[in-house]
Amino acid sequence: MSNHTQVHPINNPVFSLPPLSTILVVIQRRRLIWTADGALPEDGDVVLVLEGLGKSLNSALKKLFGASVIDEELVKELVKDIQRALLVADVDVSLVMAITERVQEQALDETLPRGVSRREHIVRVVWDTLAFFLGEKTVPLTINPGKPNLVMMVGIQGSGKTTTIGKLARYYQKRGIKTGVICADNFRPGAYSQLKQLAEKSNVPFWGDEDEKDATKLAKKGVKEMQKKGIELILLDTSGRHREETGLIKEMRDISKGVKPQEIVLVIDGTLGQQAGVQAAAFQKATNIGSIIVTKLDGGAKGGGALSAVAATQAPIKFIGVGEGMDAIETFDPTKFAGRLLGMSDIRGLIDKVREAQIEVEEDQAKRIMKGQFTLKDMMAQMKQLKKMGPIGKVMEMLGLQYKLPEGMAEIQEENMKRWEVMMNSMTKDELEEPKLIKSSRIKRIAKGSGTSQKDVRDLLKQHEQMKKMMKQMGKQRRGRKGGIPGLPGLEGLG
Ligand SMILES: Nc1nc2c(ncn2[C@@H]2O[C@H](COP(=O)(O)OP(=O)(O)OP(=O)(O)O)[C@@H](O)[C@H]2O)c(=O)[nH]1
Ligand SMILES: [Mg+2]
């Protein structure tokens, strides 16, 4: 879990630095440090689903970043650490071997892409490998808007079908899809009222009939009712009746024949560990399972095993359940998920973006800046690079930066950045290299030339000075290996 206090500097009275320079510094800090010595975020965005697994993978990678030399020995150690982490998370042994072999093979691969450090390369290999073994990226449920789309949930007793239906109803309702739920579980007492309550909470129509004993008839009637209401997404809850698959699969087939769902979703309990894979395979063999939802990944230590085992059956995992609450559901994106396991929210996205924009900071430049030699020209270059990477808010997200900008703040900062750029464009080359030259007459000239006020120019200079100081400090801390920007509560360890 993140230990960041979520006080945003802007809202923090102790914090006196202008926010934009701070944001720039924080963003640059991460990039520069990656470039200068390839450091990994101290804890990053580790709001983990599989906390244990994530922590141990993260600390395995940290070793990599702490090491002074990267050689075969170190890679072997890293591979061992990863193996241990995966095995403890109940990942199947053969899968663990396959994963780590791949890492070992590629980690010391001689040809590094341009501008990628060995450390970055290894992180990426680990990342790619995990994502690869977690399966393809899937799309959420396929829904044709304006038409009734019937999705049937199946799964053994207690796997989480009813809860998941409640979550999905809310998820899709929020996204503007008219959603309704049907209870076709005439087996478990209380099934009717359980779903009814969930539906009421999420404000979606519910249909059920406690007196109807035939599940197929129940389902059929329900679907008709929902169609009458013009419901676009009909979620059909079925009974889990059995602890094992056989009897359940028969009932499932009967209902499915009766109502012809667009998609059958198998709900599997993630605390089953590797056994979840066996179950997924059995269902897949017997019926036309369209997708899988793995639940209860918030709890037990076995989630890693469950996920990887289910993924290994090639069944598309579309959502994961991460709690009992109605919002505790997430779409499953292997790449993102692997990143979270490693403690970074989207390193691949970042690396790709950096490549795209060709904004590799030269190592020399990074080191120079962190020694405190930071000119206005550097600042301008950084802003330009930042702009190419996308909106500030998005960039921060990609970097796994914890704090969220208050509503509208990213836009304001972008406006500020534009103004800075105009001012800098009115400066001479010498001034950009040596801001100390900029005294009052020059300030006047720059303000005039850029259509801004003298105060604006002074502000810019002040902010540049602050950034310079902060960059230098961060360089010092880096050398002393202690994170944190002074005066920036909640940002400790972001480098
Ligand atoms: N922690 C956690 N609990 C969950 C999750 N999903 C479901 N549960 C819990 O698991 C239990 C069973 O969930 P249900 O939704 O009733 O399961 P079901 O598959 O409908 O069960 P039957 O109708 O008896 O077959 C409930 O206590 C849920 O709160 C999850 O993602 N995390
Ligand atoms: Mg149920």
Image: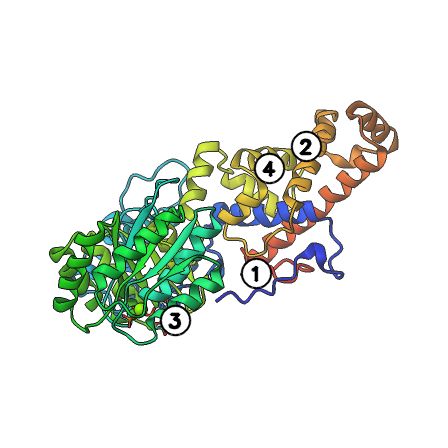
Ligand 1 sits in quadrant: bottom left
Task: From the viewer's perspective, tell me whether residue 271 is left or right of residue 6.
Answer: left
Task: Give the crowd class for mark 3: few <14, some 14-19, many >=20 residues within 10 Å.
Answer: few
Q: Residue at x 25, y 71 (%)?
A: 272
Q: State the image coordinates of residue 21 (x, y, percent, origin top left).
A: 68, 45
Total number of numbered labels?
A: 4
> Hey, what amino acid is under mark 1?
Gly
Q: Can residue 469 be seen?
A: yes
> Hey, what amino acid is under mark 4?
Gln
Q: Earlier in the sequence, mark 1 or mark 2?
A: 2
Answer whether labels 1 and 2 touch (C-beta < 8 Å).
no
Residues under labels 1 and 2: Cα distance?
Answer: 30 Å
Q: Earlier in the sequence, mark 3 or mark 2?
A: 3
Answer whether labels 4 and 2 touch (C-beta < 8 Å).
no
Q: Is label 4 or label 3 in front?
A: 3
Q: Earlier in the sequence, mark 1 or mark 3?
A: 3
Residues under labels 1 and 3: Cα distance?
Answer: 52 Å
Residue of label 3: 193
Residue 483's disc number: 1
Residue 456's place in the image compared with 291, above or below, is above
Task: Give the crowd class for mark 2: few <14, some 14-19, many >=20 residues within 10 Å.
Answer: some
Determine the image quadrant of residue 93: bottom left
Does ligand 1 reach within 8 Å of label 2's beta carbon?
no
Residues under labels 3 and 2: Cα distance?
Answer: 57 Å
> Hey, what amino acid is under mark 3?
Ser
Residue of label 2: 418
Here the colouring is rainbow
Residue of label 4: 382
